[in-house]
Image: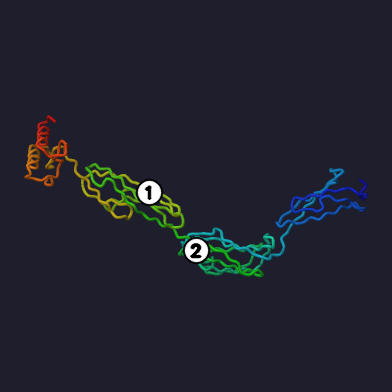
Amino acid sequence: KYNNPVPDEEVSFGTTAGYISPAINTTNNNGEAVALLYAPEEVGSATVTVFVVSNSSVSNSTTVEFIPEEYTDAYIYADPEAIPADGVSTTNITVKLLDDHGNLVPRSGVQVYLTTTNGTFENGKQSISGVTDNGTFTATLKSSTEPTIAIITANVAEVGEIDTTVTFLAPAEIVFGGLVVEPTEGVAPLTVNVSANVTNIGEVEGTYNATLVIDGAIVNYTTGTLNAGESTTVTFEHMFNKPGAYNVSVNELANKTVTVLTAYAKGDVDGDGSVLPSDALAVLRIYAGVDSPENYTGANPDVDGDGSILPSDALVILRIYAGVE
């Protein structure tokens, strides 16, 4: 307590980074205990503490900063490493100065010269130069419109050439296929289910707009997003209320024809809109072989649905006409 040197006391040393040797040493006649602090490979700081082993309340601490060495190497990278080949998307090309242990050396004014095999830098050219700022130099590279791999080379003063790559990805490309239309024939009103496959054959995410097209006109649509290489199925439902032949498609796929027939009353064999004795006569003519079912565009002459055209079918028609069936 009188500030006199105290010899022969053991002193303990500790650090939060690096290491100290010896960890315990004894004071000399001048009251001094000495240990060596070995720096870590990482830039940073350490808190060094000491205390007297026989009386730990006698302690102290200090802070030591670990600074980088002179740069001996450099590192180049792209962020992101892949962008769409759309002539618009960009990536940052960064060069960092490093010491022997991979620590950033914050030195400014070091000359850096960049070249690329594809795409252009922010100056519109395939080369650009500048100097580091606190150990870093960054340039912006814009993609070309062709899918490819760009090789970016940096020539760094006192280091030499280093390089990295950037992939220019094929843009999203949406293709349609596998058109299915069911049913393709029936009486009005007829509900038809339409489906098609949608695939993104590009290398980046893309959106699709699937349209249901009837006789060249868009009557419905749905949209979605697909990752690169992803597929999905789109479905539509449409009701046809009027007889006729309709061309049905999704986007620009080849049309499929849907035939919508008139719903004739049971027994209206000749399709004139009424059930009359003439319809029964038509059935008898078909049964006798003097006429053909193809000559009648109305209801099925097999009125009772037993699979044959017989006089009994004509009888059913007459019963309908008479109002007893």
Q: Quadrant of the C terminus?
A: top left
Q: Amino acid at mark 2?
A: Ser
Q: Amino acid at mark 1?
A: Thr
Q: Are there few (<14), some (14-19), or many (20+) residues within 10 Å of tag 1? A: few
The image quarter containing residue 320 is top left
> Disc 2 on helix, strand or loop?
loop
Check if mark 2's residue and mark 1's residue have beta carbons within 8 Å: no
Q: Are there few (<14), some (14-19), or many (20+) residues within 10 Å of tag 2? A: many
Q: Is residue 281 left or right of residue 210?
A: left
Q: Is residue 153 left or right of residue 216?
A: right
Between residue 312 and residue 200, name the one nearer to us: 312
Between residue 263 and residue 19, name the one nearer to us: 19
Q: Identify the disc placed on residue 233.
A: 1
The residue at the far top in this view is 324
| Image coordinates for residue 235, horizontal then vertical, percent | 35, 46
| Image coordinates for residue 282, horizontal then vertical, percent | 8, 41
| Image coordinates for residue 15, horizontal then vertical, percent | 77, 50
Q: Measuring 85% from the left and 45% from the top, which residue is drawn there?
A: 53
Q: CA distance from mark 2 to mark 1?
A: 32 Å
Compare marks 2 and 1 and give the one earlier in the sequence: 2
Q: Measuring 87% from the left and 43% from the top, which residue is drawn there?
A: 54
Q: Is residue 250 left or right of residue 30?
A: left
Q: Which residue is mark 2?
A: 143
The image quarter containing residue 34 is bottom right
> Disc 1 on helix, strand or loop?
strand
